[in-house]
């Protein structure tokens, strides 16, 4: 799994500019009704990048941000390619710390959000299909626990279903 392959897949989920005032990611503070409503484009949100001109963000600029701030921070070189994309996609959708903790939970290790030697050993010891299935199960359980599930749950479920297809293709 190269970054370019992963990015092409990701843009299938993330794309057009959205400015939903009920989505906290669209606000510069991450708090609905506080700060500036700047929106999200290509999955790059005002909450995460409050100083960025979200509406005028180019696809190339988004790609640079994803490589620098997300791809390079998920231990991509240390994980199986099938796992990398799953964790990366979830990190973009729900936050890096959440994605790493759910991967650790799926592997049965302490959920500290640091994918270090102990986590990597546990992940590598598991059957690839098992870790992929457990990780996506943790992802769904996390998403269904959110107060915004009623509003965004259908879209999140479709996204996880697509991820399960990718997991089957990549393993």
Image (tube, grey):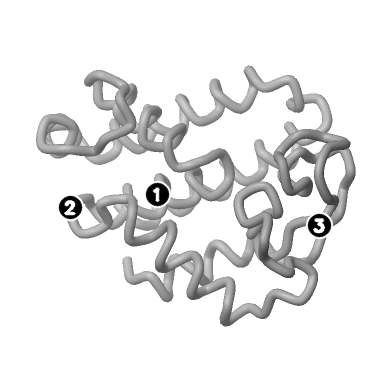
Q: Position of residue 111 (x, y in %)?
A: 31, 22
In the image, is 23 to the left or to the right of 144?
right
Residue 168 disc label? 1
Disc 1/disc 2 C-alpha distance (Å): 20 Å
- Which of disc 1 and disc 3 is earlier in sequence? 3
Q: Residue at point 22% right, 20% down?
A: 109
Which residue does the numbered mark 3 point to in the structure image? Answer: 38
From what the image shows, is residue 42 above or below residue 146? below
Q: To which quarter of the image does residue 32 belong?
A: top right
Q: Residue at point 35% right, 38% down?
A: 132
In the image, is 117 to the left or to the right of 20?
left
Q: To which quarter of the image does residue 134 belong?
A: top left
- Which of disc 2 and disc 1 is earlier in sequence? 2
> In front: 95, or 14?
95
In the image, is 14 to the left or to the right of 90?
right
Q: Position of residue 130 (x, y in %)?
A: 29, 31
- Which of disc 2 and disc 3 is earlier in sequence? 3
């Amino acid at each position: 799994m190269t970054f370019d392959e992963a990015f092409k897949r990701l843009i299938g989920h993330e794309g057009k500019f959205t400015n939903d005032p009920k989505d906290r990611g669209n606000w510069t503070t991450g708090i609905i009704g506080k700060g500036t409503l700047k929106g999200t484009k290509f999955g790059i949100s005002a909450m995460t990048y409050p100083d960025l001109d979200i509406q005028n963000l180019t696809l190339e600029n988004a790609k640079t941000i994803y490589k620098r701030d997300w791809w390079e921070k998920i231990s991509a070189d240390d994980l199986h390619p099938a796992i990398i994309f799953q964790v990366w996609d979830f990190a973009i959708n729900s936050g890096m710390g959440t994605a790493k903790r759910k991967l650790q939970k799926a592997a049965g290790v302490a959920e500290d959000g640091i994918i270090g030697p102990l986590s990597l050993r546990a992940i590598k010891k598991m059957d690839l299909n098992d870790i992929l299935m457990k990780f996506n199960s943790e992802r769904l359980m996390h998403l269904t626990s959110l107060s915004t599930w009623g509003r965004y749950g259908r879209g999140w479920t479709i996204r996880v279903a697509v991820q399960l297809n990718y997991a089957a293709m990549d393993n």
